[in-house]
């Protein structure tokens, strides 16, 4: 599952995509790019032809941690549209190597109108990172997805292996809590968490929400030589006991 960076930037009218990385050591996992956003949009047409709109968007390619609550509310006689988006995320590094990420995202949208009304709340995090050649990492990922029982609300979390074209983790919809683990071989990866609520052209009163959380961590798998080195003191102690 590939992420359309150009489409995201165009749709949100945000700044250019750029890289995000901490000072890395040889053999470290490197964050190639990161994009976080919290966005709320609202538009409404009233019964007598008046219109109102509101937008609140904050995006970042390098702030760590990133936290923002976006709010938008548009009101006219005979109509209202509103949206909210909450975003809290952070990336972790150990000895210059990317070691994990957390994200909490919430969005809702509502309309109260007898004419045209649109509202969208969006909270999302997208990370590209690379596991270097000669290294292998174990990963764990836990989280929770909840949303309105409606196609206008979406909740999605995934971890994608770009080189092998494989979804290592894919959670979508109102699926609740999860706890998964696996292994990362050398190559490029995409990590994404996205909450979106959308209301459009709905007569009367309408409301949807989406709520997600994610905790992702990785740790290097010791090389066989390192395992043997760790086992050497134990073997020496065992020999001493036998000769004691």
Image: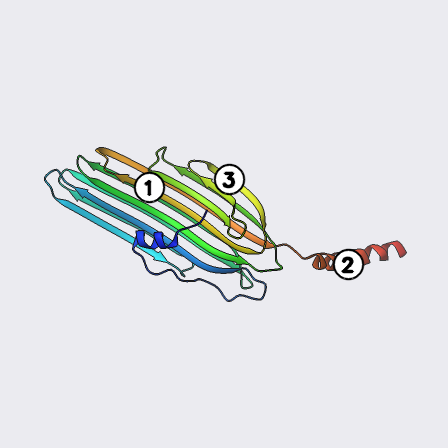
Q: Give residue 103's position: percent from left, percent from top.
A: 44, 49
In-image side of 48 versus 206 (left or right) = left
Marks 3 and 2 close (CB-CB < 8 Å): no
Q: Give residue 44's position: percent from left, percent from top.
A: 19, 42
Q: Considering only order in the chain, which callout, 2 or 1, is on the residue closer to the N terminus?
A: 1
Q: How is the rendered protein coloured?
A: rainbow
Please, which residue is most extreme toward the right here? Answer: 243
- Residue closer to the observer: 73 or 186: 186
Residue at (11%, 41%) from the top-left corner? 49
Residue at (53%, 53%) from the top-left corner? 163
CA distance for labels 1 and 2: 56 Å
Q: Which residue does the numbered mark 1 point to in the structure image?
A: 197
On the rendered image, what quadrant is the C terminus found in? bottom right
Q: Give residue 175's position: percent from left, percent from top.
A: 45, 36
> What label sits on residue 232 in the rendered view?
2
Within the image, what quadrant is residue 13 found in?
bottom left
CA distance for labels 1 and 3: 22 Å
In-image side of 87 versus 235 (left or right) = left
Element under disc 3: strand
Nearer the observer, disc 1 or disc 2? Answer: 1
Q: Considering only order in the chain, which callout, 2 or 3, is on the residue closer to the N terminus?
A: 3
> What label sits on residue 178 in the rendered view?
3
Element under disc 2: helix
> What label sits on residue 140 in the rendered view?
none
Q: Give residue 232's position: percent from left, percent from top.
A: 77, 58
**How many residues crowd around disc 3 within 10 Å: few (fewer than 14), some, or many (20 or more)?**
few
Report if residue 39 is visible in the image.
yes
Query: Can you say whether 154 is above or below 191 in the image?
Result: above
């Amino acid at each position: 599952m590939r992420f359309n960076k150009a489409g995201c930037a165009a749709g949100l009218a945000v700044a250019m995509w750029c890289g995000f990385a901490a000072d890395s050591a040889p053999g470290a996992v490197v964050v190639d790019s990161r994009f976080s956003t919290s966005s709320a949009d609202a538009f409404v047409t009233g019964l007598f032809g008046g219109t109102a709109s509101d937008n609140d968007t904050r995006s970042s390619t390098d702030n760590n941690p990133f936290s923002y609550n976006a709010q938008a509310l548009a009101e006219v006689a005979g109509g209202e549209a509103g949206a909210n988006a909450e975003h809290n995320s952070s990336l972790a590094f150990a000895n210059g190597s990317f070691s994990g990420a957390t994200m909490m995202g919430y969005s809702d949208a509502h309309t109260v109108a007898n004419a045209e009304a649109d509202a969208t709340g969006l909270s999302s995090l997208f990370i590209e990172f690379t596991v270097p050649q000669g290294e292998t990492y174990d990963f764990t990922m836990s989280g929770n997805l909840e949303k309105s029982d409606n196609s206008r609300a979406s909740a999605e979390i995934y971890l994608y292996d770009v080189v092998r074209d494989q979804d290592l983790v894919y959670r979508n919809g109102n699926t609740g809590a999860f706890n998964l683990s696996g292994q990362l071989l050398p190559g490029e990866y995409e990590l994404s968490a996205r909450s979106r609520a959308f209301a459009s052209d709905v007569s009367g009163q309408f409301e949807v929400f989406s709520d997600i959380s994610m905790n992702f961590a990785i740790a290097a798998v010791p090389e066989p030589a390192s395992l043997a080195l760790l086992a050497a003191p134990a073997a020496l102690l065992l020999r001493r006991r036998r000769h004691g």
